[in-house]
Image: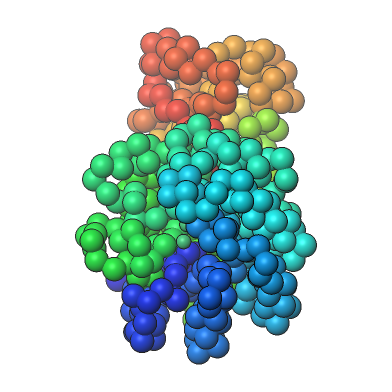
Amino acid sequence: MIEKNLIDTHSHLDDEKFSGEVAEVIARAKEAGVSRIITIACWDKEKGFTPTMALVEEFPELFFALGIHPHDAKDVEGSDVYDDIRELAANHKDRLVAIGEAGLDYHYDNSPREIQQEVFIKQINLAKELKLPLIVHTREAEAETLEILKKEGIPEAGGVIHCFSGSVEMARTALDMGLYLSFTGVITFPKATELRDVLKDVPIERIMVETDAPYLAPVPYRGKRSEPAQVVATAEKIAEVKGLSLEDVARITTQNAESFFKVKDSAAEDSSSSGSASSAAKIAYKIRNSLYLNITNRCTNRCTFCAKFSSYTVKGHYLKLAKEPEFADVLKAVEELGTPPIEYDEIVFCGYGESLIRVELVKKIGMYFKKMGCRIRIDTDGLANLVHGRNVLPELAFADCISVSLNAVDSDTYERLCKTPFGDKAYPAILWFLREAKKHIARVQATVVSVPGLDVEACRKIAEEDIGVAFRVREYNNVG
Ligand code: SF4
Ligand SMILES: [Zn+2]
Ligand SMILES: [Zn+2]
């Protein structure tokens, strides 16, 4: 079984459909690899938050959020709900992880819209006051919801739109505002093609997973009561749509949820060193079934689009090296991952940094693994010849593939985007590097990052027609 550690970030275990069965539901979740569950308490004018608080009392492993669903906004006036939330927050600092769900629901319109808006705004401010993140519910009111959030300002601790089901444009607006998006089993429904397109577009670093149990059971449980264990099916679908492994999706979404909700992992000690979220930089790490080697953080350029300037984490792996590793450190890091090198699809020199700055180490490691029969790929900016003052390509003939960042259609654009210290020498040197690479390495590809305004088709033409190498577009915002 694949080792996975998922968090169901949104469920309603206080729902009567779970009555008397919560212990079994939690046990089944753990069994399925869902280590943590956040249960959302929606205030009720008769019961307040009592049903959830009883569960929280009984099951110390649960985390929870408190909020007023837009359906119930009409009942708030005359109640003490905001003070109740403040009091519960003071008493449950370690397990109350957010305010919400709060927002607008114009599908059912169970409460008048103005009242929904007022109660939403009050909860945004309450989240700010309590320094907690906000869980947002929005249905057929996406534009209005984002407008209010823009006007009021998202709490410093962050915001997530749960059960996201809006358009690509809406998702991009939300991401630009700094929000996270959380996906439910809806993405597994056969008809949800558009939502899967949205999912494709959203960087996995901003995605969380949830069930919204007891609702929205994913395929193959559709029509049944949903429960936290089923979040695995949603994560599997994300893996399929994004071309990642389930392990990748689990690691990344869990890390997202851990940092967003500040939920501690009580089981962290017994997960393996390679799989657990660790603050020590990874020298060797796995994405899909490829092994990546991170041997330097130094770069020749300072690309404007580089994600390392906002975060040093790629696909859930922290890459900021305290010290550059040597040959033995790399071998040790690979060994610690536990998979025999030959079993990886390929071994890639990548990471946040330009590996060929350390060309001697690349050669030593590359040839070592090549002798074992592994497939080797080098990801590079194509500037190594300028850096080293010689043609290094004949020395890299052990590689099976070299992937060179072209990034521009001309020298000016390149200089502007990549802030290269080599000025107008850089771009022609890359074109030369690509041509020369063909003589020594079986597979050569040029890549571009689809930054807004870049003429991707013109780049493709340069690569495929002028130089005669393969071409690949890497999505802006999608690293790794
Ligand atoms: S070469 Fe790569 S890691 Fe370095 S700044 Fe550019 S995009 Fe970032
Ligand atoms: Zn909701
Ligand atoms: Zn909900």
**Closer to us: 278 or 5:** 5
Tell me how many marks there are.
Answer: 0
Residue found 66% across the figure and 44% down from its top: 149
Q: Residue at x 38, y 70 (%)?
A: 228
Residue 156 in view (yes/no): yes
- Taking the view exactly as shown, the residue that stands out farthest to the front is 78
Provide residue 169's location: percent of width, then percent of height. 50, 31
Give the percent coordinates (x, y) of residue 63: 55, 75
| Viewer-proximal residue among 10 and 200 | 10
Question: How far across and down, in percent of the image, does residue 47 sit?
Answer: 53, 78
213 versus 269 height, above or below = above
Q: Is residue 162 visible in the rendered structure shown here?
A: no
275 over 391 or under it: above or below:
below
User: Hey, which quadrant is residue 26 in on the image?
Assistant: bottom left
Task: Reply above or below: 12 against 309.
Answer: below
Colour mode?
rainbow
In front of the other: 292 or 441: 292
**Where's the N terminus, which quadrant?**
bottom left
Work out whether 101 lies above or below 179. Answer: below
Query: At which x and y percent is residue 206?
Result: 54, 49
Please report the residue visible at 31 percent of the width from the left and 42 percent of the height from the top: 192
Residue occupying image coordinates x 70% and y 82%: 91
